[in-house]
């Protein structure tokens, strides 16, 4: 599979993702600049974490206007795969490719810590290869990660098996006690109805190298490779 990793002004996880995909997982990777209007034949587009355009207006609100996003939206609407991580997730909601919004953390502070994710969806490529009875330790680093959506949208997400991950305890208990940012229903990631666009706040690329002492994120990326 050929991946494209987009860099916006302010992206800071683009090279991390390129390294994991290319050097650890042996995949072909194209570096895409936000002003590009050509996806260079990639099968899978990744919008990495960071602070696109400094988050000066609202996270992802300016990045959605970059020329590359027109191509990303067309790619997704044709069934092409897209993954947004952290700021990338915010860009996907701002662009209308995913439902809901990412609001300021309920403590109004930037949070950087390890969390445990419980896989929820059984039909999405990013979770199909994961053990639903296991949790995965993945780092978060965000100030605006509190997922919110209207009640009708949340019902649709649940009915269509679109919730990818929920914040949980190491043992898999989903409760407010293990919700780092106040996200609705502890939601850490969602997909669209067609299940070709994925968004998550935690950073799997920061937990995919044995030298970091944690490879839980690699399982998530391997699931994509297997089922996309």
Image (cartoon, rainbow, N blue to C red):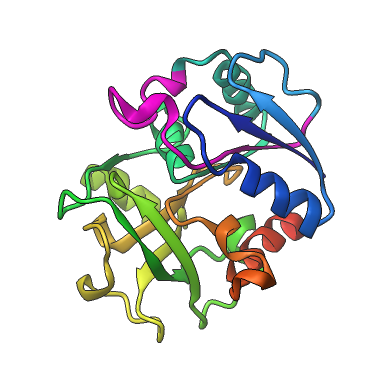
What residue lies at 61% left-to-right and 42% top-to-bottom?
Answer: 196
Res 123 visible = no
Quarter that holds the N terminus: top right
Picture residue at 35% right of the left edge, 74% below the top? 168
114 drawn magenta: no
Would you say 193 lies left or right of 149 here? right
Residue beneath the point at 64% across and 42% down: 15
Q: Is residue 83 left or right of residue 86?
A: right
Magenta-highlighted residues: 42-64
Identify whether 169 is placed above or below 19: below
Give percent across and percent down for residue 131.
59, 78
Q: Left or right: 110 with respect to 218?
A: left
Nearest the camera: 154 or 200? 200
Q: Is residue 146 above or below residue 185?
A: above
Identified at 71% across, 62% down, the residue is: 222
Residue positioned most to the front: 211
């Amino acid at each position: 599979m050929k991946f494209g990793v987009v860099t916006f002004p302010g992206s800071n996880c683009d090279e991390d993702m390129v390294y994991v995909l290319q050097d650890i997982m042996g995949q072909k990777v194209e570096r895409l600049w936000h002003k590009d209007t050509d996806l260079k034949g990639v099968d899978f587009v990744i919008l990495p974490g960071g602070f696109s355009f400094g988050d000066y207006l609202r996270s992802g609100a300016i990045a959605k206007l970059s020329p590359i996003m027109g191509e990303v939206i067309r790619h997704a609407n044709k069934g092409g795969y897209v993954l947004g991580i952290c700021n990338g997730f915010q860009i996907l909601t701002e662009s209308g490719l995913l439902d809901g919004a990412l609001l300021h953390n309920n403590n109004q502070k930037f949070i950087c810590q390890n969390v445990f994710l419980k896989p929820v969806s059984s039909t999405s490529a990013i979770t199909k290869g994961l053990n639903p009875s296991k949790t995965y330790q993945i780092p978060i680093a965000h100030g605006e990660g509190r997922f919110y959506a209207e009640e009708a949208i949340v019902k649709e997400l649940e009915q269509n098996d679109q919730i990818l991950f929920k914040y949980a305890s190491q043992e898999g208990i989903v409760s407010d006690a293990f919700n780092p940012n106040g996200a609705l229903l502890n939601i850490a990631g969602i997909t669209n109805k067609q299940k070709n666009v994925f968004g998550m706040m935690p950073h799997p690329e920061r937990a995919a190298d044995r030298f970091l002492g944690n490879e839980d994120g690699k399982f998530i990326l391997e699931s994509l490779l297997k089922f996309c």
